[in-house]
Image (cartoon, grey):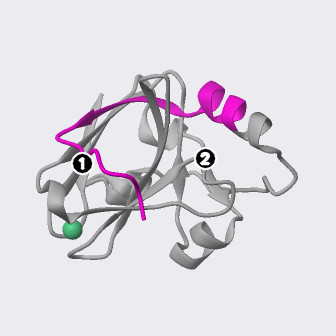
Amino acid sequence: MLFKGQCHCGAIRVELKTDRTPSEQILGACQCSFCRKHNARAFSDPKAHVRLIAAEPSEVQRYAFGLRTSEQVICRRCGVYAAMTLTDEGKVWSVINIDTLDDRASFTGVPQPRHYDEEDREARISRRKARWCPTTLIGWPTSAPE
Ligand SMILES: [Zn+2]
């Protein structure tokens, strides 16, 4: 199944390819301060595939904090938080904000609270590579995040 979505204005598009139905999907509620301020419902599945498309690359704002192992992707124009990405050795993984998808209402799983504060840098990167969605970035800006 292919699910499509976007930020509010369409500058950032999100595509999720998965074999599971929306109601079977497990959603996370990461307890970090960034995700709580957005009240984000996170989705990741290593068997799924994500495409993040910068329809308007100049509107893609990337933000890093804490251990700075990932980048939060926010639309500069409309303010929607779209995804979080990890890039390593040319490969990309991501967690997406499931509420960017057109079919968001059909993802009915109760988001599970997740606490990752105790992780060190290495543990965090290896968990993400194991659990996040393999991702293709399209039209993505190449500058460093702010
Ligand atoms: Zn936007």
Q: What kind of residue is marked 2?
A: Thr
Q: Is residue 19 above or below residue 42?
A: above
- 55 sits to left or right of 72: left
**Residue at label 1?**
141
Q: Position of residue 44 (x, y in %)?
A: 53, 39
Depth check, front residue: 40 or 57? 57
Q: Secondary structure at mark 2?
A: loop
Give the residue drawn at x 57%, y 51%: 109
Q: Position of residue 53 (x, y in %)?
A: 21, 43
Q: CA distance from mark 2 to mark 1?
A: 18 Å
Depth check, front residue: 63 or 118? 63
Residue 95 located within the stretch drawn in magenta: no
Mark 2 / mark 1, whichever is N-terminal: 2
Q: Position of residue 80 (x, y in %)?
A: 33, 70
Q: Residues within 10 Å of mark 1 (few under 14, many from 20)?
A: some
Q: What kind of residue is marked 1?
A: Pro
- 118 sits to left or right of 70: right
On residue 69, which mark appears? 2
**Extent of the magenta region:** 125-146
Give the residue drawn at x 30%, y 53%: 101
Give the residue drawn at x 76%, y 35%: 122
